[in-house]
Amino acid sequence: MVFAVALAAAFLGGGNAGCRKGADAPAAGAADMAPAAQRARSQPKDRMRGESGAESRSVVESRSVVESRSVVESPAAKAAVRKAGEWLAAFEPADLRFDAAVGLHALRRWVDTPELERAYETALPVARRDDDNPLLPLAGVDYRAPVDAVAGWRAPTPGERRVNVNRVVAEAVHCQAHGFREQTLAYIGGPMRDDGGYHTAHGAWALVLARDRGCVAPERFDALARELRSELAAALAAAAEPRTTLDADLMAERLLMLVMLGQGPARLAESAQRLVKLQRPDGSWDLSAAAGEGAPAPAYYGYHATLVATWALALLIGTPTNP
């Protein structure tokens, strides 16, 4: 989302074993990369252009994003996106994971630069290696997953262990072909939620994906979206100032999902401005290196946090090329 650490934890993860047919192993995404305790708490004008690819109706093409995108119009936000693109394009290819192409494919529909294009072209081959991943359409790859790969899992009930976040996202991606089950909707609105953490965020992403594909009735979407917005907004407001990369990643993911869910612009402005101020001089949101605390985090944590922050800002400042 995709993008599950927040989206370095939630989006999608490297390898995404949890999305493969019949697999229940967690994907190495945002939520799964976060420490257990945290998971429990849970230049030139930007070039706008459309992207060809299999994903013709992505989550970022929803009306809620268009309604919220005027939140950040400052030159600082635009400069932050451009600088982040330069950092993402220079990232070591060997350290990339599947979800890099997902986030880049989505955000380039709103803001595109030569650097973001280069970053996507570098990330896409990494995603293509996972050639049966149900989330490939989110990376711009034409792929139709079989029904058992996306709907062959059972939604946990209260008290049971939550499933990998990418399962609900994958079901939403392919809902036009295979449907979006009632048990999945109930799971998103119930046991999946984790007080505004990575699971709640991915449930929100799946809900918007399913809505944009016509798989959720407007009334049902509105009711669930209202609850998830409230939970994510409360968590965003209550969180301490980010000190680590995972803190920044979760902050960015909450902001991104609130934009997708149609949170009012006035309520997003302050958080968006805080996110811009958190950017490091090199263009990343890799705060762990700056804090100098503990052992260094895996390199991809910084990439994921930067990817999610850039995606959130792109939705807020950009113009959709194919709504």
Image (cartoon, rainbow, N blue to C red):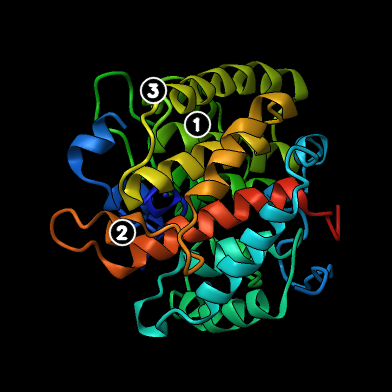
Select label 1 or label 2 by which is in front.
Answer: 2
Q: Residue at x 41, y 42 (%)?
A: 250
Q: Which mark is residue 184?
A: 1
Q: Residue at x 71, y 68 (%)?
A: 54
Between the C-alphas of marks 3 and 1, the distance is 18 Å
Q: Residue at x 57, y 76 (%)?
A: 86
Q: Which mark is residue 7?
A: none
Residue 57 at x, y = what percent? 76, 53
207 lies left or right of 212: left
Q: Mark 1 and 2 residues: CB-CB less than 8 Å, in contact?
A: no
Between the C-alphas of marks 1 and 2, the distance is 40 Å
Q: Quadrant of residue 255?
A: top right
Of 215 and 193, nearer the camera is: 193
* Residue 152 visible to an observer of this rendering: no
* Residue 31 visible to an observer of this rendering: yes
Q: Quadrant of residue 321?
A: bottom right
Q: Which residue is mark 2?
A: 290
Residue 96 at x, y = what percent? 40, 75
Of 191 and 298, nearer the camera is: 298
- Could you tell me which secondary element the residue under label 3 belongs to? loop
The kind of residue on which mark 1 rests is Thr
Q: Residue at x 39, y 22 (%)?
A: 195
Q: Which residue is mark 3?
A: 195
Between the C-alphas of marks 3 and 2, the distance is 28 Å
Looking at marks 1 and 2 on the same chain, the residue that comes earlier in the sequence is marked by: 1
- Could you tell me which secondary element the residue under label 2 belongs to? helix
Q: Mark 3 and 1 residues: CB-CB less than 8 Å, in contact?
A: no
Residue 37 at x, y = what percent? 19, 35
25 lies left or right of 66: left
